[in-house]
């Protein structure tokens, strides 16, 4: 039994060392990666169809404010964590407004 525990300890040490080496290799590879590999949306410069976007957002804001109330409602938690009958809080969709 002692030999098996010693062998297991040795194997865990070997795996740990290997994982540290892999992590170091990945860190080095990521530091040397060109920026072009990282995807990101270009910053909006105000050109293009910005006037259409502005009108859409204004119309959407007007429609949303006239639809009355929220689409989701916060349901608070009932009792404290660990108490019998505890119910976690969360958001509930207002089914009548979603359909």
Image (spheres, rainbow, N blue to C red):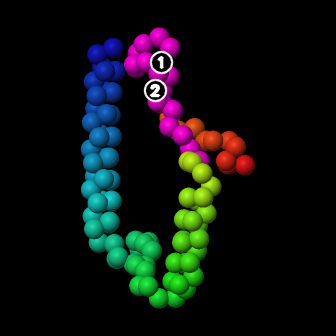
The residue at which mark 2 appears reads as 77
- The residue located at (51%, 32%) in the rendering is 75
User: In the displayed image of the protein, which residue is found farthest to the bottom?
Assistant: 47
Magenta span main SS: loop
The residue at which mark 1 appears reads as 86
Residue 63 painted magenta: no
Residue range in magenta is 71-89
Categorize mark 1 by other alpha carbons within 10 Å: few (<14), some (14-19), many (20+).
few
Query: Relative to 17, does residue 47 appear above or below in the rendering?
Result: below
Query: Relative to 45, does residue 34 appear above or below in the rendering?
Result: above
User: In the displayed image of the protein, which residue is found farthest to the right?
Assistant: 99
Query: Relative to 23, does residue 35 appear above or below in the rendering?
Result: below
Residue 62 lies, in percent from the top left, at 57, 65
Q: Which mark is residue 43?
A: none
Residue 84 painted magenta: yes
- The residue located at (29%, 60%) in the rendering is 27
Dot 2: what SS? Answer: loop
Dot 1: what SS? Answer: loop
């Amino acid at each position: 039994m002692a030999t098996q525990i010693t062998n297991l300890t040795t194997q865990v040490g070997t795996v740990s060392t290997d994982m540290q080496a892999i992590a170091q290799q990945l860190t080095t590879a990521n530091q040397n990666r060109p920026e072009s590999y990282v995807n990101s949306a270009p910053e909006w410069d105000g050109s293009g169809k910005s006037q259409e976007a502005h009108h859409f957002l204004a119309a959407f804001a007007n429609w949303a404010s006239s639809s009355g109330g929220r689409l989701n409602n916060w349901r608070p938690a009932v009792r404290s964590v660990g108490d019998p009958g505890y119910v976690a809080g969360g958001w509930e969709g207002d089914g009548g407004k979603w359909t």
